[in-house]
Image: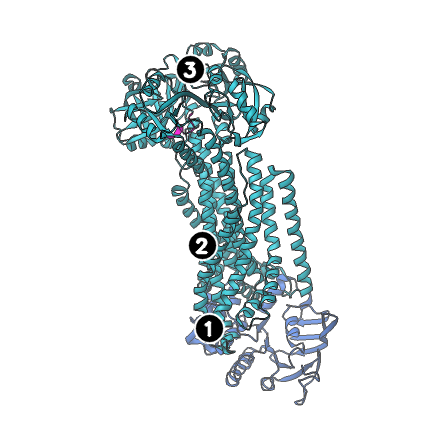
Amino acid sequence: MLDLKRLVKHYPSGEETVRALDGVSLSVAEGETVALYGPSGSGKTTLLSIVAALLSPDSGQVMVNGKDVRRLSVRQAARYRRLDIGYVSQHPHLLPGVSAIDNAALKLFAGRLTVREAHREVAPLLDRLGLGGRLSHRAEQLSAGERQRVLIARALSTSPPLLLADEPTGSLDTRRSRDVLEMLTEVCAERQAAMMLVTHDPQAAAFADRIHALVDGRLVDYEPETPLLQPNGL
Amino acid sequence: MRPSNIFYLYRVRLRSRLVQELLALTGIAVGVALVFAALVANTSLTGSMRELTEGIVGQASLQVASRGPEGFDQQLLREVRKVDGIAQAAPVLEVRGNVVGPNGRRSVLVVAGDPTFARLGGTFLPDFNDPRLGRQRALALPAPMAASLGLSLGQPVRLEVDTRVGHTPLGARLQEEDIGDLVDHPVVLAPLEPAQMVTQMEGRVTRIFVKADPGEEAAVETALRRIAPEGVDVKSADADITAFEQAAYPTNQSTALFSMFSALVGFLFAFSAVLLTVPQRRRLVADLRMAGHDAGASVALLLLDALVLGAVGALLGVALGDQLSRHLFESTPGYLSSAFAIGSQRIVTWQSLAIAIGAGVLASCLAVLVPMRDILARRPPRRTSRKAASRSGHRVAGAGCVCLAGTTLIVAFAPGAALLGIVLLTLGLLLLLPLLLKGAVRVFEVMIAPVRSVSPTLAKIELQSRESQTRTFALSATGAIAVFATVAIGGAHADLERGLDASARDIDGNADIWITFQGQANTLATTPFGDAAQLFEALRDVPGVRSARPYRGSFLDLGDHRVWVIAPPKGSERLVPASQIKAGDPVLAASRIGTGGWVTLSESIADELEAGPGDRIELPSPRPKAFRVAAVTTNLGWPPGAIVLNADDYAAAWDTTQLSALHVDVVPGVSSAKVAKAIGRVLGPRTPMLVETARQRTERHYALTRDGLSRLTQISALVLIAAALAMVATMGGMIWQRRPILAALKVHGYSQRELWSALVIESALLLGTACLAGAAFGLYGQVLLSRALETITGFPVFYATAGLTATLVLAVITAVAVAMIAVPGWLAARVRAAPSAAQ
């Protein structure tokens, strides 16, 4: 499903160079959930952005479902993000003033579906995520957990084979985090979708089939004692 | 994305930014309204004159016209009709006079013709074919004028043409369906013969309109020139339009200049208001990108935002502008009506509509499309480094200095390019504003260093924040431009008023009392009257009258200029308006004018004739005469220019004994006002003559010149009010959006009072600096505009730095804006402490 080979991404920062990714290789199979575990600034979000075709790597290869993501044109990249992947970000930002169902249907509006058809498509998903009674509530009227679930519904609305989840429980309390992660893994399992879960929370990582640690831009095997804090405190 | 989905997303997103959209809508509407009202006012002025002229001349292409009001012998018509290639030739008598009805008196242009007039095909003309009109020897009046004067069909109309008064029945009330928009013109139609009798101009006409056979115009013109006697010109049938455009030039130019400022303020208002929603739009673009929408969908959504906002704002603006043009800019500048019969109808052209609506839509597109760079960027935008930002800031400031240098060069060497100078100065202000704001915050930082209060520090931090830089700039630019425009144009306006007032004092101070023909159109004493003997007789018995002398004056078409001719009596104290001399010695010039054979010319006329002091010119008066130039003057307040000579020279050059005013001097020690009243009593209540003291006349003269500039004052006030409201509204909106941050600051122990003080200090510093910059640039703009007025139009301009005006405008606008911002600031600072809101 997902095949990353020797990905490198460096950022200049003043006189120094930040090695966000330094030769990362990783594969995720269909229906598999892989957790990328690492501290802040370890390159996790950079990796997800490259897989989502939002950033280009300096070198290396990204293959998703047989597509070389690096070779996608701007238009193809947009279509790829809409149909081939779902992206759940850390911050549950929704379009302000817009209802839960419209926010969830945002990806579907891009296709040939009418608003009514898009609503019909996404409503069962929201219901499955426990938001059946909140469809017409505006973004401001939803709790942080509800907003995160709307984002999950949006990500899954086009039934993508790959879900990218960037700290999806970062702004939630423990109980809500567990609920959200349970839902994510359940829905992915139902749809045979692969998921790459980025987190710095070991409890969240535990929901994955496989866990890798990302330290200083390099992928290492996860050991429970893998130090997340660097000697300089970062 | 399906268009229906784009519209749906637009609709569902609207409620979250309704307040900001309304603010932006107001900004666009205000800008469009000011631009549209100014355009309609300008178009109506020239359009009204064009309609009147075309309504009279019809398909005629040439005219044989008298240079003076006395006209020429009607026998010339017979000669004209003999010229080969002439299809039609129609005689016309045009006389300025007053129509009096039960409800009052109106200055009118009496247009008298015979049935051949109708064959020229003008809108006005079919009624000359109406046999009833000729048979009844009656007048036809536009219905609105007849109604306002209380005149009904068949009722006798009192027609005053100088001292001659006639009574003629009202034969027709012309409706809009008869004469179209001309129904709003101050025109009276009359059959030729009765009109000649009433005006005691039997056998005389003032023009013959000529319709040439196709392709024969040039030959006909040559032949007409050959037969035209002395004092008669052959010119284009619509020559009045050119002369009018020339006279209305300063009014139209200044209104256009103000329109530009209005548009800029309106745009900045809209821009500031729309910037409040930029974070939301950025977020939308990011979300759409993540959701797999292509750039086209984002652009379509933003464009729909812009088009709806722009179109609705522009339509509201057009409706508002329509009302402004009806109620505020409606009046025709009074000074123009003394030489031209201009109607009061409004002319709205598709060009005015297109420009106003286009400007509104463009403003909203530019403002809404700010997040476009996020869409166009293949990658998410990264912050520019402080160093790069500083380099770019220096480049912007450098460009501002170049603009300022360009303006200085224009002031010094090419004041004729004033419009370009104003554009450069405005650009310079906008480009230097970020640097000035930065400097002000630096100074403020130093000043508050020893202060213990936290509020100034909070204000400083917000003003230094890079996140709010664009918004801060847009807001400050609104205030700076408004103050700049008001100070620059207000200052130039005051300079001009001082010059015009001095000119009026010089001209009107020539006599203690003036006796002229009544009517608004005769404020410049240009309507002649013949029967002065009766007046002299009447004055003989009035106690306190020392002497009475004839004053003569009129308008003379000199090329495209309809020139004001001023001919005071020989012994006048101020034969030459000394304050208005631009070249030549005032004392020598006065003495030469008194001797005779000398004239003064306005600079524009002198330039056209390529003559200076001492040079000889041939004056194309009804009886052309050679004069020498005694001095070169300003235009004495009449845009096309003026000529001064003594009354006897005028009589010889115009071949007339008529006068246009009587100069009465009173016995020393006797009150002019009392003598004027006594003269009024002797002339009786129904006299068509107006008796006024020099002081009263000067006041009326001032009012006339101020009337010509009134539109500037009105637009200036509107721009200032619009800018103050814009700043208050957008600053208030900005403060209101900051409530989550204020809530978080409260968690850290800041009190409501401290937060409110910080908001007020921030507003005061921002607006104060912007308005100060605007005032400083405005004073420079005043120099530029005054120089331009002086050199382009030849107006009398007495320059004085408008420091007081600038200080007042600066203080009032800053104080009002800060006081008004204090209210939303106080309400926003009342937000409950909430740590989560800060996230």
Is tag 1's residue or tag 3's residue first in the polypeptide sequence? 3
Is tag 1's residue or tag 2's residue first in the polypeptide sequence? 2
Camera-nearest residue between B241 and B801: B801
Q: Is residue B563 visible?
A: yes
| Dot 1: chain letter | B
Image spot of residue B782 (x, y percent): 55, 44
Q: Of helix, strand and loop, which mostly describes the magenta segment?
A: loop
| Dot 2: chain letter | B
Q: What is the residue that sits farthest to the front in this orientation?
A: B669
Tint applied to chain B in the drawing: cyan
Q: Which mark is residue B566?
A: none
Tint applied to chain A in the drawing: blue
Is tag 3's residue or tag 2's residue first in the polypeptide sequence? 2
In this picture, residue B458 sits left or right of residue B71: right
1 vs 2, front mark: 1
The magenta stretch spans which residues? B518-525
Image marks 1 and 2: residues in contact by CB distance under 8 Å = no
Q: Amino acid at mark 2?
A: Thr
**Disc 1 to disc 2, how far (Cα)?**
31 Å
Q: Amino acid at mark 1?
A: Gln
Give the residue at mark 1. Answer: B752
Camera-nearest residue between A217 and B779: B779
Give the residue at mark 3. Answer: B657
Residue B271's place in the image compared with B56, above or below, is: below
Q: Amino acid at mark 3?
A: Thr
Q: Secondary structure at mark 2?
A: helix
Decide whether residue B522 is among the magenta residues.
Answer: yes
Q: What is the residue that sits farthest to the bottom in this orientation?
A: A225
Q: How is the image coloured?
A: by chain
